[in-house]
Image: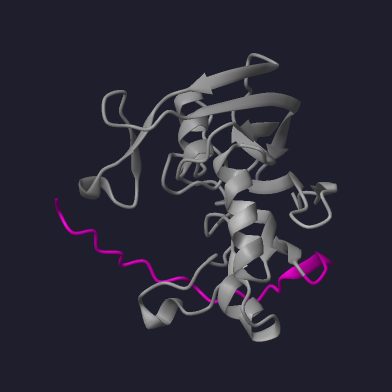
Amino acid sequence: MSEIIDTFIAPPCHDSIKTLYQDEHLLLIDKPAGLLSLSGKNPQNLDSVHYRLVQIFPGCTLVHRLDFGTSGLMVIARNKAINAALCQQFSQRAVTKRYVALLCGHVADNEGVIEAAIAKDPALFPLMSLCAINGKPARSRYRVVERFARQLADGTRLALTRVELTPETGRTHQLRIHCQLMGHPILGCDLYGGLLLPGTERTSRLMLHASELHFTHPVSGERIEARCEAPF
């Protein structure tokens, strides 16, 4: 198999991580767009959610990740035992994740399900691919919140749809690929066709935000239903 070489260098992220909740076992944070979840192998990609938080909370570990361009809710374990307990909930699909996204164009149906297997292909890195034979099953639900148009600087109007996305599996780039498959890529997605048309304003970020995270607290047994409003 071909070796994957990651040449991506993250630009500096000047936005801070917002801590929404903390106790002795875990943290709930709002990750800014444009920040890696975990530091990369390249020393220029040292800055990340984990790198910043471990300075304040020694021993903390990531339970899951958000893409570099995605903002929103993440749960962080403060020790290995909590990490293991939370990872088990994720692997058993006992965690509900919801996202808000702006999609290019007007989505016809008010809700629906996208089901298409996703595979890693070193030849396409960093892109993932749709592959029914070698891919892992991937399923996402969507619900339209609103359809609207945005006026651009050159006078043209850009049709957009705000949707709520609920991934039922957790594949890399799943929501981005599934939205592209619908014919409505996420605005600002440079990997899967979501940039604006030539000659128009280019959006400054990926319009994808992790807005809800529901899970069971590993120690108290309380059902946590965290929410974090999208900044767009």
Residue lying furthest left: 1
Left or right of 110, for residue 92: left
Name the spot of residue 95 as percent of width and height, x first. Answer: 67, 41
Name the spot of residue 135 as percent of width and height, x first. Answer: 33, 32
Residue lying furthest top: 109
Q: Give the prevailing secondary structure in the magenta stretch.
A: loop
Q: Is residue 18 magenta?
A: yes
Foreground: 221 or 95?
A: 221
Left or right of 12, for residue 192: left
Name the spot of residue 90 as percent of width and height, x first. Answer: 60, 45
Foreground: 32 or 122?
A: 122
Q: Residue at x 50, y 68 (%)?
A: 38
Q: Residue at x 40, y 71 (%)?
A: 9
Residue lying furthest bottom: 55
Identify the image quadrant of residue 160. Answer: top right
The answer to whether one can see residue 64 in this image is yes
Q: Residue at x 15, y 54 (%)?
A: 2
Left or right of 133, for residue 140: right
Identify the image quadrant of residue 100. Answer: top right
Foreground: 144 or 54?
A: 54
Q: Is residue 82 magenta?
A: no
Q: How is the image coloured?
A: one colour
Name the spot of residue 72 as percent of width and height, x first. Answer: 70, 55
In the rendered image of this protein, does residue 9 appear above or below residue 91? below
Residue range (magenta): 1-24
Q: Residue at x 66, y 65 (%)?
A: 77
In the rendered image of this protein, does residue 27 appear above or below residue 41? above
The answer to whether one can see residue 32 in this image is no
